[in-house]
Image: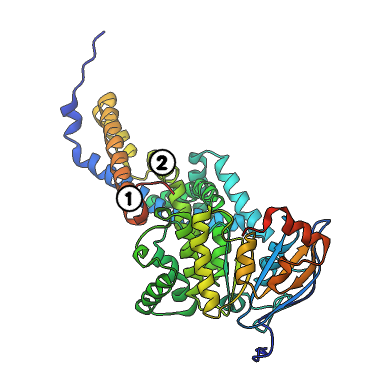
Amino acid sequence: MSLQLDFPAVLERWPSFLAGAVLTLELAAFATVLGALLGTLAAVGRGTHNALISGACKAYVETIRNTPLLVQIFLVYFGLASLGLKFSAFAVAVAALTINVGAYTAEIMRAGFEAIPRGQIEAAEGLALSRLQIYWHIILLPAVEKVYPALTSQFVLLMLASSVCSQISAEELTAVANYIQSDTYRAFETYIIVAVLYVILSLVMRAGFWGLGLVLFPRRRRLGTPL
Amino acid sequence: MQQNTSSAPIVSLRNVQKSFGPLRVLDGVSFAVERGEVLALIGRSGSGKSTALRCIDRFEKVDGGEIVVCGHRVDRPDVDLRALRQDVGIVFQSYNLFPHLTIEQNITLAPCAVKGMATARAKDLARKVLAQVGLEEKLHAYPEQLSGGQQQRAAIARSLAMQPKVMLFDEVTSALDPELTAEVLKVIEQLAADGMTMVMVTHEMGFAKGIADRIVFMHRGKVHETGPASILTTPTTPELTQFVGTGNLKS
């Protein structure tokens, strides 16, 4: 039994790998930004006293958290198609990933909101700030800071999970790998390279979130202490 | 409904009722605070004094009775909360500074966001109110870099920046050691000397005696005894006698 690896045969397809990696990063970037917005709104919605809004947010979160991502992607993909709506595979992938990560973000943000002491909100109310101003100035940033590690892990996880978008022929990294290995018959080499590329993408995202953290949390940057 | 001519009290409670479930916390509480007056609410834990104070700023909704604060009918469901709270400043036992903001940002936030004050003017104001509490050098510090006493003084400054007509103090020194308590009380004393109308819940009997124009002693949800500070030395009811006699009256 001998293992013979022929990397050059696969590596000569590097422009395709690069294009796939870039698309994966784009998918992750769009879904992260949109998912963060959706998830935060869902977390706020779940905390409201309006039973209808709160119930709808809870149903959304629970549905998504208890179904596989691949099934969600197919539901969006075929659902839109059966409504006669045509979108690119990229757009469908972004939509499905956003809906997916939004649910997890909602749960994480809810934990962040609940970690804000009641006294903070009373102090803000006592200063005559409006509800919206309190959410914006007093609750949101400290809540994000408290759950930032969990939140960013979730977004990196989302990037990795985006590999299943290959199933709807979005041309991201795993889809590219599938083509290349069926072309070159060098499956093992191909997926080793892809695995390394995913590691690099993860490190890029983590570095990005670290930098964003420095901008978002000046107090932490100056004092180095957790909130 | 701005009916606060100079003769009308700034704060008035009339027969205020409040229950938490089956527990009757306020059982027909009445008192009034005139402009420039310092009123100390004293009593045992659970006597209802903190609840009474919180009702003034509508952190608790009353079940019955009438509360008028700077012309606002606080007992009514349609009271304009944000207008009320621009007239009333409140300082809490646990400071509640916003930990992610510098002291300056803590102070300028409400004047800018609520009153639409320009940033430069708000920063000038922050310097002014911090000077009032002796903390000018802490302008750019974060709350956690301050001692408890300094945090409480910063919280007072934050309240002052909204230029309230009346200040409420809810056991503001209860979390502080005697030395830090003294520096906070000094600030409050200065405010009183400047003519600020104040209602304070306090366990510092010596301080209450020194600063308060009037004492309201609460017992079991009722105003049990009320009068000038001298009632602490010559109480007429057995309950107040016992209360001031149990070592509460520090020299």
Classify mark 2: helix, strand or loop: helix
Mark 2 neighbour class, 10 Å CA radius: few under 14, some 14 to 19, many 20 or more: some
Left or right: B59 in relation to B90: right
Same chain assignment for discs 2 and 1: yes
Left or right: B94 in relation to A193: right
Query: Residue A110's spot in the image, x, y percent?
Result: 55, 50
- The residue at the point 37 percent across, 73 percent down is B127
Mark 1 neighbour class, 10 Å CA radius: few under 14, some 14 to 19, many 20 or more: some
Give the amino acid at mark 2: Ser
Give the amino acid at mark 1: Glu
Classify mark 1: helix, strand or loop: helix
- The residue at the point 34 percent across, 50 percent down is A223
Q: Which mark is residue A153?
A: 2
Left or right: A160 in relation to A135: left
B55 above or below B11?
above
Query: Residue B18's spot in the image, x, y percent?
Result: 78, 65
The residue that disc 1 covers is A26
Tell me if residue A119 can be seen: yes
